[in-house]
Structures are given as C-alpha cells and as structure tokens.
Amino acid sequence: MLIAINETNIDQRLIQQVVEELKNGEVIIYPTDTVYAMGCDLKNKAALEKLARLKNMKLNKSKFSIICKDISQVTEYVQQMNRPTFKLLKQSLPGPFTFIMNANNDVPKYFDSKRKEIGIKIPDNKIVLAIVTALGNPLVTTSLIDDEDELLEYFIDPYEIYQRFDDEINTIIDGGLGRLEPSTIVNCTKEEPELIREGAGKIN
C-alpha cells in the first residue's frame, strides 16, 4: 500500500501504522533527505533477514546503515567518539550524510557478523525521524539501488517506486519527490575523518 504523509503536517496515526508494520517484521520504503530508501526494525531479526534477501545478499555480509533519531541515540551503538568526530556530527546532522563509525560490541549480534563498523545516518527528513522516534530504536536502512547502479528518475517519484516494488513490500510511503543525489560518506573510524564519497552533504 502507498501511504501519503505530509512532511509539513505529519499525521501521527499514520506514523503509528507504519511502526506497527515494522514491529511485525515488515520492510518499508520511505523518503530521506536524499534518495528513497528501504529499511526495517533493527531489533527484528526476521525483518533484517528479509531486507538482506531483498538486496540479494546474506545478512552477515550486509553493510546496512542505521538511522538514529539524534546523536544521543547514536552513542548507544558506537564506541566512544573523539572530539573532532563528535564536533563533525554535531555540525552536520541532521543532514545528507553517512558516517562510518566504530561499532560497539552489540552491533555484530544484530547482523550475525563480526562487523566492527556501522554506518550512521540522521536524515533531515521529519517523516523518517518521526518513524524512528515512535519505533524507539534505530531503523536499519539501505538505498533502493546498489552503489554501482545508475540513479534513474523513477527512484525519486513515490508512485513509480510503488509500481516497481508493490509486489515485494507492503508499505511504501509517499513523502513527495525524492532527490537523485546520494548521501556524502565520511569514514570516522580513525583519528581524522576521511571523505569516502561526496554527495548531497557538504563538509566544511
């Protein structure tokens, strides 16, 4: 189903409906401040495995990121960050960035892996942040396409996305037109942050 949610006037009943789907193990498609994405509840293993299948990969080989509601929630999933990294996150988020950070000991358990890093996002989009806040924990997220795929126009139009993914995904949120530019990726696992991919986010 296609659910229209207005970012400037969010209907909390619709947010709650989406959260119930997530808690029931469903994968959803939703807007961010860059491209549309698909994701699921971090705390639901069956949903994580379903998301991995949709991306044609094994869960323990996935490199999914998580969307947090704020930096305070980020600290629950990463190792203690140094001052330059904390300052960079404070000045950049919410915004169109993915920060690769050293994961804490709990993160590998969610993904059945030994992964030591996790991508962190706090998009500047009120719809997805309302979902994460109501869910009570992060949303595992991945873009609709793979990095090597070309960003095509149908990835920005929610109705076109609905036509393409309706058979596979129960809940698709229409939050207006998306953007074709992906997030900027910054590696924060070492002393100095390193730009991996320049996208919509501009680093000062």
Image: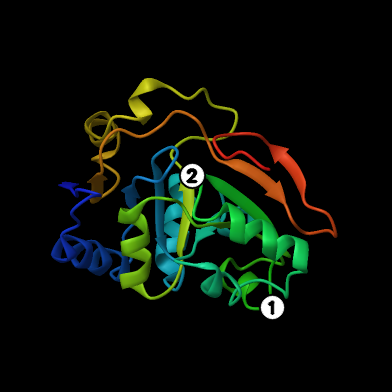
In front of the other: 79 or 19: 79
The residue shown at (78%, 59%) is: 189
Amino acid type at image mark 1: Asn
Residue neighbourhood size for the residue with mark 1, other residues' Cα within 10 Å, grouped as few (<14), some (14–19), many (≥20): few
Dot placed on the residue nearer the N-terminal end, 1 or 2: 2
The residue shown at (36%, 70%) is: 133
Q: Nearer the viewer, mark 1 or mark 2?
A: 1
Quadrant in the rendering for residue 137: bottom left
Instruction: Say what secondary structure mark 2 lies in.
Output: loop
State whether residue 162 appears in this view. yes
Amino acid type at image mark 2: Lys
The scheme the figure's colours follow is rainbow
Asked whether the residues under the numbered discs 1 and 2 touch, taking CB atoms below 8 Å apart as contact, a structural biologist would say no
Place of residue 108 in the rendered image (x, y in percent of width and height, measured from the top left): 65, 70
In front of the other: 24 or 120: 120
User: Which residue was labeled with disc 2?
Assistant: 55
* Image height of 204 relative to 41, above or below: above
Say the numbered circle drawn on residue 105: 1
In front of the other: 125 or 131: 125
In front of the other: 93 or 102: 93
The residue shown at (37%, 60%) is: 129
Instruction: Say what secondary structure mark 1 lies in.
Output: loop
Residue neighbourhood size for the residue with mark 2, other residues' Cα within 10 Å, grouped as few (<14), some (14–19), many (≥20): some
Place of residue 9 in the rendered image (x, y in percent of width and height, measured from the top left): 18, 54
Relative to residue 32, is residue 104 drawn left or right?
right
Relative to residue 27, is residue 192 drawn left or right?
right
For the C terminus, give its image quadrant: top right
State whether residue 117 appears in this view. no
Q: CA distance from mark 1 to mark 2?
A: 25 Å
Place of residue 10 in the rendered image (x, y in percent of width and height, measured from the top left): 20, 57
